[in-house]
Image (spheres, helix red, strand yellow):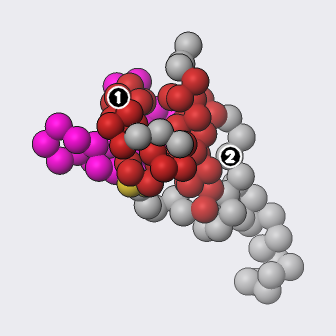
Amino acid sequence: MYEELELRALKLLAKSFEYNQALHMEAPQMAKLLGVKNKDIQPVLRALGDANLANLYEEGDNIKLAKISWQGLNEIGDVNLKYGMGKDAYKNYNAEGYR
């Protein structure tokens, strides 16, 4: 369904989301982490954006920032939030002294 690099990029965006749900990733940073050239990440991010798997911020013809979308998170499946609310945020509500 997806090219290998598209799937790797989507997984990278999901991993970034686990640690900070508010921030986008920079395209050059993604290229470096994926071991590709900056120009090669552009069509990958465009494909993810066209499939509604990522939200993109563009300047001119270049994609500057990307963040996984809710559809992308559903595609990846299990995402464990490391900080922030998380899916079990209230499980230990009483034990943490908030009552």
Residue 70 counted in the magenta span: yes
The C terminus, quarter of image: bottom right
Q: Is residue 76 left or right of residue 21?
A: right
Which stretch is magenta? Answer: 50-74
Taking the spot 63% from the left edge, 34% from the top edge, the residue there is 76
Taking the spot 67% from the left edge, 35% from the top edge, the residue there is 77
Q: Few, some or many C-alpha atoms within 10 Å of disc 2 (few <14, some 14-19, many ≥20)?
A: some
* Residue occupying the far top of the picture: 1
Residue 94 quadrant: bottom right
Residue 80 counted in the magenta span: no
Residue 45 quadrant: top left
Q: Nearer the viewer, residue 11 or 99?
A: 11
Q: Is residue 52 above or below residue 60?
A: above
The N terminus, quarter of image: top right
Residue 31 quadrant: top left
Label 2 vs 1, first from the N-terminus = 1
Q: Nearer the viewer, residue 77 or 99?
A: 77
Q: Nearer the viewer, residue 3 or 32?
A: 32
Disc 1 designates what residue?
43
Residue 36 rendering spot, x and y as whole percentages? 47, 39
Residue 38 rendering spot, x and y as whole percentages? 36, 43
| Disc sitting over residue 74 in the figure | none
The count of marks equals 2
Residue 35 rendering spot, x and y as whole percentages? 53, 42
Q: Is residue 12 left or right of residue 98?
A: left
What type is the residue that disc 2 sits on?
Val
For the residue labelled by badge 1, is the local secondary structure a helix, a strand or a loop? Answer: helix
Q: Is residue 31 visible?
A: yes
Q: Nearer the viewer, residue 1 or 77?
A: 1
Disc 2 designates what residue?
79
* Residue occupying the far left of the picture: 60
